[in-house]
Image (cartoon, rainbow, N blue to C red):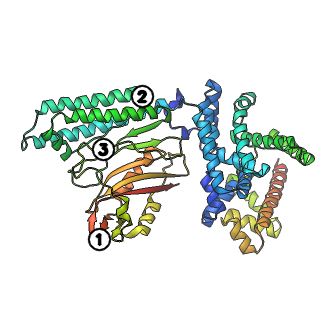
Amino acid sequence: MTKKNKHIIPSLKQFLNYINNKMNSEKRNAFEKHLQKDPFAEDALDGFLLLDRKKAEKDISIINKKILGQNKTSYNSIYITGIAAAIALLVISSLTYLAINQLSRSKDEKQLGYTEEESLQKEKELIFLAEEDADTGYTQKEITATGSSMERVKKEQPKIIITDQDELIKVQNEKIEEVIEEDYIFYSVESNAGAAPAKPVVAVDIICEEKNESVAIAVLEDADKGSKSSRKTLSPDYKKRPGYIAPLPVKGMESFNKYIEDNAIIPDSIDLVSASVLLRLLISEKGEISNIEVLRSPSPTLSIMAVELIKNGPRWIPAKIDGKSVSEEVILTIDFKK
Amino acid sequence: MRLFKKNKNLYSDQELLDAYKENSDQKVLADLFSRYTHMIYGVCMKYLQNQDDAADAVMNIYEKLAKEVNRHNILNFSTWLYVTTKNHCFMELRSRKAEEKKHENWKEDYQIFMESEVFLHPIDENELHSEQLKLCIEQLKAEQKECIELFYYKNKCYMEIAEILDINEKKVKSYLQNGKRNLKICMETANDKKE
């Protein structure tokens, strides 16, 4: 099918934006030109003018859930599996390579619990586990630690990699039970925003292929909870205190939004008119961005683009409690447009 | 197997439809339908004038779809779905016995529409710079000409045109519609003359 023959369907959001006058006149004109061509859309617009917006959104999402949920066997699961397996292999092998590098570098300085050969062996097992996971065809999720956490792990308890992995696998299995029907893919995104490699990178990407509802993030606990690297979220009580200031991009939210607006453009290869990617990231007390996770995204490409945008974006001012900088998580929605 | 090569969003309606006809995978149909859920909902709302009825109608249409798809030779899924949706709404209205005669007329309308090919007006087909079209625009009545020029050549939206010409938006739409109809007639006579 050539592009010309392809029918463009305005999204619900576009209809509502048009009705609520949230489009500039250029976009209005483009939308109206489409209406002139497409009596279906024109009639639909007449209908939307009559209805209650919130109820409409709810009804439509319920209907979509009903019809899409009726059919568990997915015709697209096979290629998703393919993509998942390929991405998983790539990511794992590159991260393994990094990890091995780190290991051999630190080997001389530190008393290791076992030799490099042994650690290589363990790494191979990791890869094997991951491959096996990919072969089962459901989802692929790999949680990796680079740099110091690897070293730390080895010093204290040589076997922890495996037990850690066992735990992870366990987590994965739990997840997989849910995932089989839902068609989510997990894969990792390297998210070390130029910060020192001493920070373990833990990132999991969830792609929610066709559901619009939000998806709970996969469990991603670091092996060592007491370390600097484990996730830090301030308790909600802190946020209520008068001395608390939330993290902010250096040039302020307005300029940040402008940056996103200018750069979050959906590539032509993706047939979406608008999309949003939900991200969670950690702003360290120094204002460094790390632990970028994609919580919700309509496409792997957009997930990667969103992560890149944040990585290449402005620095952040860390959260403050009574003037003292603290690390804090931020949840961001990146709105992509054509 | 060719379906597995790319993301489903990249498939055209026709490709999904062919895939469904080939292996009757309900999932494919659901994906195809869900592209239009909100539009169908909107159309049902327009005719049924009640949101709960509209939501029910969307589900009913989806359920009917599986049968209907195999019975018809669908050239353009979007148009076909639109006609099916309207048809469903009229049946629904008729079964309510309200304003039966009025909707009887509507039904005739849609049948004519169904038989005719989907016709795109030349002006909507990006043929804005055709000489003949420009000649025809010159011959339009002043208001129609102004509206068409502002809308298609200056890319102004209805709201802006209404402001510029100091008329209401409904008038803008009707000038556009009438202008386009006159243009079409003008273009067709010109083509006939050539032949």
The residue carrying mark 3 is: A221
Give how far apart the Cα atoms at labels 1 and 2 are. Answer: 50 Å
Residue type for callout 1: Asp
Q: Earlier in the sequence, mark 3 or mark 1?
A: 3
The residue carrying mark 1 is: A322
Q: Is residue A199 left or right of residue B154?
A: left
Q: Residue at x 48, y 50 (%)?
A: A267
Task: Answer yes or no: is residue B123 visible.
Answer: no
Q: Are marks 3 and 1 on the same chain?
A: yes
Number of residues whose C-alpha sits closer than 10 Å to that of mark 1, classed few (under 14), some (14–19) or many (20 or more): few
Q: Position of residue B20 (x, y in %)?
A: 63, 29
Between tags 1 and 2, which lies in front? 1
Label 2 residue SS: loop
Label 3 residue SS: loop
Q: Chain of mark 1?
A: A
Q: Position of residue A243 (x, y in %)?
A: 33, 71
Q: Position of residue B71 (x, y in %)?
A: 75, 28
Tell me where residue A106 sits by quadrant. Answer: top left
Q: Are marks 3 and 2 on the same chain?
A: yes
Residue type for callout 2: Gly
Q: Is residue A131 left or right of residue B153?
A: left
Give how far apart the Cα atoms at labels 3 and 1 are. Answer: 29 Å
| Disc on res. A137 | 2
